[in-house]
């Protein structure tokens, strides 16, 4: 187990220098190929062949991101991901060996993985996805600081109510029908605002990418990841969503009315 005393930033690098990646992969050949390619792009890769070795490396700290193979011999990489996400916000990209491993990919995303790749993947694509995820991770703290700095803003407007939920845009605060606060990441907040601005209208992935304001850095697939996470927070049953509904061939739609308060 990853030490419970570690905080949410566990394993995150705070020092200047090359980007540091922990590659949890039991294929020695893949470890070497990824390490050599990334080294040419100023990225330092530390390999780990199993969960125990990965946890030792993570305890040492100093990493910016984890690339985690979900198939580690007889081990299940989801267990490591579950422990890591419970203790840390360190970005994670999961990889799977077969396209038919859809269930594992979905579970991995629901557990908090930031992106996924299916093997065999191209080294250039892996590097690109690493850079995208790291850029998103850099933006999130700034958004959190902005939210904190606006905590004393007036609450007399900029509120929207939908299906019992209330979003206060001045405070960037979402409350559920029971009145409890629900935390949103920067991407989740941006997507929710886009839906609230156009209720009951199908929104394309391109539109939603633009709404996140980092669309030039994001692959289409990342919108699906954010939608999945937002559904987990809003839906009674995320596997059968009734608020954020998929519009086949178009994108997604917020299937409820929105009241301005």
Image (spheres, helix red, strand yellow):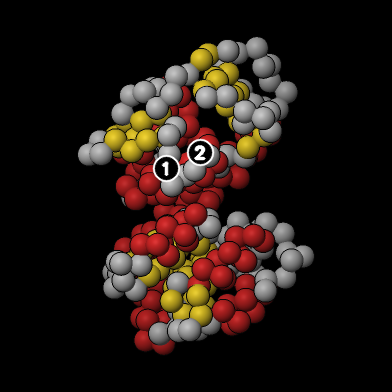
Quarter residue 120 falls in:
bottom left
- Residues 169 and 132: in front is 169
Q: Measuring 53% from the left and 13% from the top, which residue is drawn there?
A: 260
Indicate the secondary structure of the residue bearing disc 1: loop
Residue 31 can be seen, yes or no: yes
Quarter of the image containing the C terminus? Answer: top right
How far from the left and from the top, in percent, is residue 193? 47, 28
How far from the left and from the top, in percent, is residue 168? 60, 23
In the displayed structure, 52 sits above or below 16; it is below
Q: Measuring 67% from the left and 61% from the top, which residue is drawn there?
A: 87
- Residues 2 and 48: in front is 2
Neighbor class of circle 2 (other Cα within 10 Å; few <14, some 14-19, many 20+) is some
Q: Measuring 62% from the left and 76% from the top, which residue is drawn there?
A: 55
Left/right of residue 70 with respect to residue 161 in the rendered view: left
How far from the left and from the top, in percent, is residue 135? 47, 51
Q: Give the number of the mark in front: 2 or 1.
A: 1
Indicate the secondary structure of the residue bearing disc 2: loop
Left/right of residue 189 with respect to residue 33 in the rendered view: right
Neighbor class of circle 1 (other Cα within 10 Å; few <14, some 14-19, many 20+) is few
Q: Measuring 63% from the left and 37% from the top, which residue is drawn there?
A: 182
In the displayed structure, 109 sits above or below 150; it is below
Labelled pair 2, 1 in contact (Cβ < 8 Å): yes
Quarter of the image containing the N terminus? Answer: bottom right
In the displayed structure, 199 sits above or below 237; it is above
Q: Earlier in the sequence, mark 2 or mark 1?
A: 2
Left/right of residue 8 with respect to residue 229 in the rendered view: right
Q: Which residue corresponds to mark 1? A: 240
Residue 210 can be seen, yes or no: no
> Count of labels shown?
2
Q: Which mark is residue 235?
A: 2
Q: Which mark is residue 86?
A: none
């Amino acid at each position: 187990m990853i030490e419970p005393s570690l905080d949410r930033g566990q394993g995150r690098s705070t020092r200047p220098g090359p980007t540091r990646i922990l590659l949890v992969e039991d294929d020695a050949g893949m470890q070497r190929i990824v390490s050599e390619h990334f080294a040419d792009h100023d990225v330092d890769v530390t390999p780990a062949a199993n969960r125990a070795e990965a946890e030792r490396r993570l305890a040492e700290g100093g990493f910016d991101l984890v690339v985690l193979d979900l198939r580690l011999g007889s081990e299940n990489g989801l267990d490591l991901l579950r422990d890591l996400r419970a203790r840390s916000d360190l970005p994670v990209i999961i990889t799977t060996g077969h396209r038919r491993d859809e269930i594992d990919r979905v579970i991995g995303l629901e557990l908090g993985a930031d992106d996924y790749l299916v093997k065999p993947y191209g080294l250039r694509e892996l590097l690109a996805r690493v850079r995208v995820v790291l850029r998103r991770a850099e933006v999130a703290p700034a958004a959190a600081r902005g939210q904190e700095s606006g905590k004393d803003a007036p609450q007399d407007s900029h509120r929207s109510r939908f299906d019992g939920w209330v979003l206060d845009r001045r405070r960037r605060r979402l409350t559920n029908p029971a009145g409890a606060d629900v935390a949103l990441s920067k991407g989740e907040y941006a997507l929710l605002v886009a839906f609230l601005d156009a209720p009951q209208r199908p929104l394309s992935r391109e539109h939603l990418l633009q709404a996140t304001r980092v669309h030039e850095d994001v692959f289409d697939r990342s919108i699906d990841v954010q939608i999945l996470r937002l559904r987990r927070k809003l839906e009674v049953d995320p596997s059968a969503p009734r608020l954020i509904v998929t519009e086949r061939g178009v994108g997604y739609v917020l299937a409820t009315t929105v009241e301005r308060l």
